[in-house]
Amino acid sequence: MGRLFCVIPCYNEQEVLPETSSRIRDKLLDLISKNKIDSDSRIVFVNDGSKDATWDIITDLHHKDPVFQGINLSRNMGHQNALLAGLMTVKDSCDCAISLDADLQDDIEAIEAMIDKFNEGVDVVYGVRSKRTTDTFFKRFTAEGFYKVMNSLGANTVYNHADYRLMSRRALLGLAEFGEVNLFLRGIVPMVGYKSDVVYYERAERFAGESKYPLKKMLSFAVEGITSLSTKPIKLITGLGIFIFLVSIAVFIYSLIRYFNNQTVPGWTTTVLSVWFIGGLMMISLGVIGEYIGKIYLETKNRPRFIIESYLSDDSEQKK
């Protein structure tokens, strides 16, 4: 048994918060009644610079029931930074923390199974989708391709796992040792190590509000993850460059043979295609290298990953 903190990043979630807070509170009370977690376990909402009434709702929930806590970031920092802000804020107060999204597409019934594994000595428990029947074909195809591409390019992630996971206090302390400005927690958490396991669940449809991860953002997220965790794309470019160099030598030798045998024919199409191919390859290569240079630029600045404006804690004080 231990003290559990549920950390929930929120961005413009005023439509889902009343229902979400009620469901998770009931789940915590159920676990407390079963003596699986301590009675002083908490639910922590992290407001990631929402433009609607999200923070007002969080503040009201806290004033009505101390089981709810709130962290208000100074501005929108992005989902990964908001999640990290919550985990790092509670790491010294909890025995374990579970991160999940505010829309409750992740089945909260899996929380009990995660707690059971934690009580058995597991430090990191990943919530993994058992199937994707609620997704459209396009969403399912792109999501599954996302994990396959990520892993093939060296960003080792847990297949069909997002950010629904349990981490023990020592796993959180291990996570705190990672100082990357460019965050991709799905790839960083497995690097922490310690004993891990998975819990399978079925993901539901969002009951209100809009998805915060459209296709454009998912593609950006994939690029962020790959370039933050792996140098394999640069190695692939190097290999491709060597291959094209060898092909060019072969073409050069072939051209010389044709020239000395008086078999040369002006090839406008071949020349144009070659120029466009090499030019396009160079632009792609420069773009990939530029992504890494941009990451280095941001890392060297060492900017804060999040700034907490206020924290509604057990004593109802706002810590600046």
Image (tube, rainbow, N blue to C red):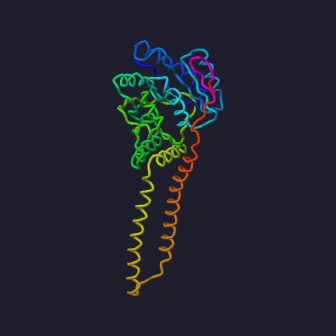
User: Residue 79, percent across and down?
Assistant: 55, 36
Q: Tell me the chief SS of the magenta region.
A: loop
**Is residue 317 part of the magenta span, yes or no?**
yes
The one of 259 and 1 positioned closer to us in this rendering: 1
The part of the image, by quadrant, that contains residue 261 is: bottom left
Numbered marks: total: 0
The residue that appears at 63% across and 27% down in the rendered structure is: 320
* Farthest residue, direction top: 33
Viewer-side residue, 19 vs 169? 169
**Percent from the top left, x then y, of residue 292?**
51, 52
In the depicted view, which residue is nearer to us: 101 or 303?
303
Residue 89, relative to residue 179: is it above or below?
A: above
What are the residue bounds of the magenta stretch?
309-318
Q: Quadrant of residue 13?
A: top right
Q: Residue at x 51, y 59 (%)?
A: 284
Where 197 falls versus 37 (above or below)? below
Quarter of the N terminus within the rendering: top left
Give the x, y percent position of residue 96: 44, 25
Query: Where in the figure is residue 30, as x and y percent of width and height?
Result: 44, 15
> Is residue 320 shown left or right of residue 267?
right
* Residue 27 among those drawn in magenta: no
